[in-house]
Amino acid sequence: MLTINDIEKIYMQKTYQVVYDFKRNYIRDTVENQIAEIDRSRRHEMQRFQLHNALASSLFADVAEDLSEQQFIDFYTSHFSLRSQTGNWEAVLWNPETRSIHFYSPEFADITADELPSAVKQLQQSYAIYTAAHYGDLQAFFGVKQTVVDTLVKQEIYAQIHSRSFTDETYLWVNEVVDYQGGDNYAIRRIHPNLKDTEGIYLSTATTDIAGNLPYLKELEGIKENGELFSTYFFKRMNTDEIAEKLTFAKLYEPYNWIVAMGIHLEDMETFAAEANEESRELTRTMVSLFAGLLILLVTLSILSVTALEKRKHRRENLALKEAANRDTLTIAYNRRYGLMVLSQIFHQYKQRRIESPAILVTDLDDFKRINDQYGHSTGDHALRTVAQVLNSTLRSTDRLYRWGGDEFVMVCDGIREDNVTWFANNLRTAVESADIAVGNATDSVTISIGVSYFTAQDTSVQDVFNRADEALYRAKRAGKNCVVLSSDTTG
């Protein structure tokens, strides 16, 4: 009996240590994966705006050679009137010689023609992507501010963290440091699924837990010294008022001054180890009474079982995280990052002549900016979700729908010939129009325009087919919207 008791103590210690090590690695890996996801989202947003900027620059350079000055002014105004309304793009067009300003977005509303050259030069520092160019006698500047890119990324990460769920009442949270010297109001609680009502409040390094610890001060000092740290303190359990000791890992994402953290209550690990120990106790006593030598094997197998269980659980949660990372949190369509990866693979197979080109359909909601401005972003979100549902229910099971950003969607459809694709796309357009996705007034319904293209033998990258599809979509908009246009240069 003394031997059994000694073995139970050792088993309990070893089991707890195994669980502790796995949980410690799990929260660290999850935080680091989340920080990597922030970086990926930031790069994708930058790439998206860089692509639009490059396309616009190329387009203006091409049309400037064929249009009169007034025609170019009209074309430039038409192009940016819609984009500047979204609040993402800023643009201005003026003639330095005549001191005439022909188009400006709100950023340049109070700037005179004489002030524009120096003002543009100063403003460039705050833009993530921009173009400054001459088109004949006209001077143009357009771009997207870094704050716009960062706001979009932060909104995406906020929705992403709130939509995720983990075992053992764990969750991610984010605090933004505003003063690395500490003190009152040193940081703002940005994201906290357990205390959502407190998001936006200021934090203080003087705050103590029930044991008198200074968790925020300790965290800030560790972040300043190493950029990350493990720590323990007492905090409220999720969805209860119970206070328990918590093991936490926190790491700094320096571009946003975000401290991304995750924790697990130590009692949960002790409970898990105790449950495993209790289940093995009766079996251990029986085995020891029959053959003491088997006891050592049992302890070893039990520890290995706990290890395998934690590994399997970790793998399942990682698979769930990967699937969630491939989905757009608002529409549940696949996201742009995943779409680019899939399309790159398809393009590679096409270039090797292993498959025929799928139909690439690019669509967005007509007058979506007006819907947001007139009825609010919640109505706009409802329209996006419903359109995605209608498109998914109308598409075939082999087709894929991706949210490309904002109100833009991309559909990849295999096995559709060019002579059938317009009919196919019109079915999608009609399905959305017939769904009566009313916003505001009953007559103010949602419609979409669609641009279609295929890969061609001359394409060097996936971007080539998107350029043609985007141009087809642009022509659909100019044709009055709520219609389908097939790219003229399509020989897939």
Image: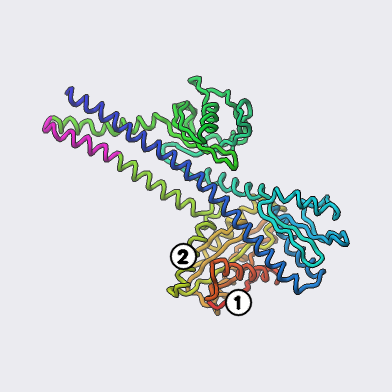
Per the model, the C-alpha gap separating discs 1 and 2 is 22 Å
Label 1: state its secondary structure: loop
Does the stretch in magenta take in 136?
A: no
Height in image: 327 above or below 400? Answer: above
Mark 1 in CB contact with mark 2 (< 8 angstroms): no
Picture quarter containing residue 476? bottom right
Q: Which residue is mark 1?
A: 489
Q: Nearer the viewer, residue 47 or 273?
A: 47
Q: Nearer the viewer, residue 212 or 51?
A: 51
Picture quarter containing residue 102? bottom right
The residue located at (47%, 31%) in the rendering is: 237
Height in image: 445 above or below 263? Answer: below
Q: In the visual, does 145 lie left or right of 435?
A: right
Q: In the visual, does 50 lie left or right of 195?
A: right
Q: In the visual, does 317 lie left or right of 261?
A: left
Provide residue 195's location: percent of width, then percent of height: 55, 34
Picture quarter containing residue 266? top left
Tell me, yes or no, if residue 278 can be seen here.
yes
Residue closest to the far left:
290
Label 2: state its secondary structure: helix
Q: Which residue is mark 2?
A: 345
Tell me, yes or no, if residue 440 can be seen here.
no
What is the quadrant of the N terminus in the image?
A: top left
Q: Which label's residue is closer to the chain start, 1 or 2?
A: 2
Query: Mark 1 is on which residue type?
Result: Asp
Range shown magenta: 289-306
Q: In the visual, does 102 lie left or right of 445?
A: right
Does the stretch in magenta take in 304?
A: yes
Residue closest to the far bottom:
419
